[in-house]
Image: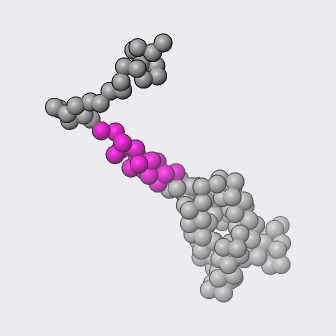
Amino acid sequence: MVLVVGAAMLAAVAFAPTELPARALLVAVVVGAYAAVVADLRAVAAVAALAAATFVGFLAHHYGDLTGAGNAWSYVVLIGLAAVLGTGYRYLRSINADDDEVAPLIRRPVPGSSVVAPPDDAPRGPRAA
């Protein structure tokens, strides 16, 4: 949540109050990057909701007013889309990481190599009592 507040402060300093798309894009990039790094979906949802409220209340309107006139809520879709895309990127990256870890473990026996079997008196072996 500190990242969202920092992004809102940076957007307020970098862009004029009339440049709502640029402010929304900066906040959306921060939310998307956060969603790409954090695996907990509850944390991503909380940060995206806080980012939406911070954008509407402080960057689009003044003094935390969430009900002011204008189309500020239409830019919240961009923030939500960034959270979904970041989460999707994180999910695809985790699938790829799982495949990289499993692939070396799956090996076919080399023709002509010997296979070591447990002794006949091993637990649950053919001569187990």
Residue 108 visible in the snapshot? yes
On the image, the x and y values in percent for residue 46 come to 72, 59
Please name whichever residue, 84 or 44, is drawn nearer the observer in this view of the structure: 44
Apparent side of residue 104 relative to residue 30 in the rendered image (left or right): left
On the image, the x and y values in percent for residue 76 come to 67, 63
Apparent side of residue 45 relative to residue 118 in the rendered image (left or right): right
Please name whichever residue, 78 or 111, is drawn nearer the observer in this view of the structure: 111
Task: Please tell me in which quadrant of the rendered image residue 29 appears.
Answer: bottom right
Task: State the residue at coordinates (68%, 62%).
Answer: 48
On the image, the x and y values in percent for residue 120 come to 37, 19
Task: Please tell me in which quadrant of the rendered image residue 14 appears.
Answer: bottom right
Task: State the residue at coordinates (34%, 39%).
Answer: 106
Task: State the residue at coordinates (63%, 63%).
Answer: 79
Task: Give the colour scheme shown.
Answer: one colour
| Quadrant of the image containing the N terminus | bottom right
Region of the chain picked out in magenta, as a range: 91-107
